[in-house]
């Protein structure tokens, strides 16, 4: 496929979405043909799925959660990501398959093999060319989320998880950084918006120009 596929990952509150907006403005100013998107909810069907299972107080069984994230992703890959890459566009997605590996695998405790099989079914094996992992301490992320409550972010079921849950999710991401160092790059996301922005720009521009 001609385009480039970049994903942003990190625990909730790590600043991914903020940095994606800043980077997208910068790349578009430079004339990059860019599609920015996100999971869950990057397609019309995905938006309905997201509201049905994330923005609800109803108890959702762990297997339903795993498969709903997969359904959202299958629709995203087939109808938006693949066609955009085939047209040669740069696609940046706020979250993708590594989130399922970290949240449903390490977070919820699903067997790694099962999670990887479900990811493969949903993606047909499409992997990002580059993943930027926004690494932040769980304490800092939780402080940020509580300080900025009510500023337009829609609350969801995952926001109620424990510190231990986010510790497991973060450790799983750090494990991917070790096992796939060429694709999965870690940046320190504890600093100011401006500091993190510099690291993100250097990394992504370096990758796109390579
Ligand atoms: P994510 O998409 O990873 O959940 P957001 O980009 O939505 O994170 O950021 C979570 C909250 O923290 C937002 O209210 C945002 O304004 C704030 N924020 C983002 N980056 C920083 C930063 N570097 N320092 C302090 N606050 C930040
Ligand atoms: P969202 O509001 O998009 O959070 P963020 O801005 O932090 O990305 O909520 C998405 C939530 O869904 C977030 O807690 C991570 C979780 N998630 C999974 O558990 N598995 C997945 O495969 C994906 C894509 C997200």
Image (spheres, rainbow, N blue to C red):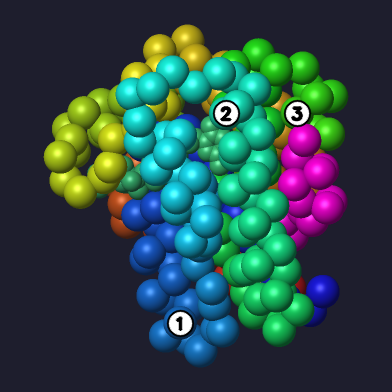
Residue 198 shows in this picture:
no
Q: Give the range drawn in magenta.
A: 118-129
Find residue 91 and report its horizontal and vertical position in percent. Answer: 61, 69
- Distance between the alpha carbons at the discs numbered 1 and 3: 35 Å
Q: In which quarter of the image is the N terminus?
A: bottom right
Residue 79 on the magenta span: no
Residue 65, numbered label: 2
Q: Which image quadrant for residue 202?
A: bottom right
Report the number of discs.
Answer: 3
Q: Distance between the residues labelled 2 and 1?
A: 35 Å
Q: Quadrant of the C terminus?
A: bottom right
- Relative to 62, say whether 147 is above or below: below
Q: Could you tell me which secondary element the residue under label 3 belongs to?
A: helix
Report which quarter residue 209 is drawn in. Answer: bottom right
Q: Mark 1 points at which residue?
A: 28
Where in the image, quadrant-wise, is ligand 1 located?
top left
């Amino acid at each position: 496929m001609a385009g480039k596929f970049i994903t942003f990952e990190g625990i909730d509150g790590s600043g991914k979405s903020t940095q994606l907006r800043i980077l997208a403005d910068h790349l578009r100013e430079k004339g990059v043909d860019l599609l920015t998107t996100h999971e869950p909810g990057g397609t019309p069907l995905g938006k309905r799925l997201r509201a049905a299972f994330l923005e609800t107080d109803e108890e959702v069984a762990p297997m339903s959660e795993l498969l709903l994230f997969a359904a959202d992703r299958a629709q995203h890959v087939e109808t938006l990501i693949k066609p955009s890459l085939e047209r040669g566009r740069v696609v940046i997605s706020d979250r993708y398959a590594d989130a399922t590996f970290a949240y449903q695998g390490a977070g919820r405790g699903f067997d790694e093999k099962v999670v990887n099989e479900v990811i493969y079914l949903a993606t047909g094996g499409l992997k990002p060319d580059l993943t930027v992992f926004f690494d932040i301490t769980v304490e800092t992320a939780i402080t940020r989320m509580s300080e900025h409550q009510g500023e337009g972010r829609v609350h969801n079921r995952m926001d109620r998880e424990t510190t231990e849950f986010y510790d497991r999710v973060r450790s799983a991401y750090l494990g991917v950084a070790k096992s796939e160092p060429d694709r999965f790059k870690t940046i320190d996301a504890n600093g100011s918006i401006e500091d993190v922005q510099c690291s993100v720009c250097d990394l992504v521009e370096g990758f796109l120009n390579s």
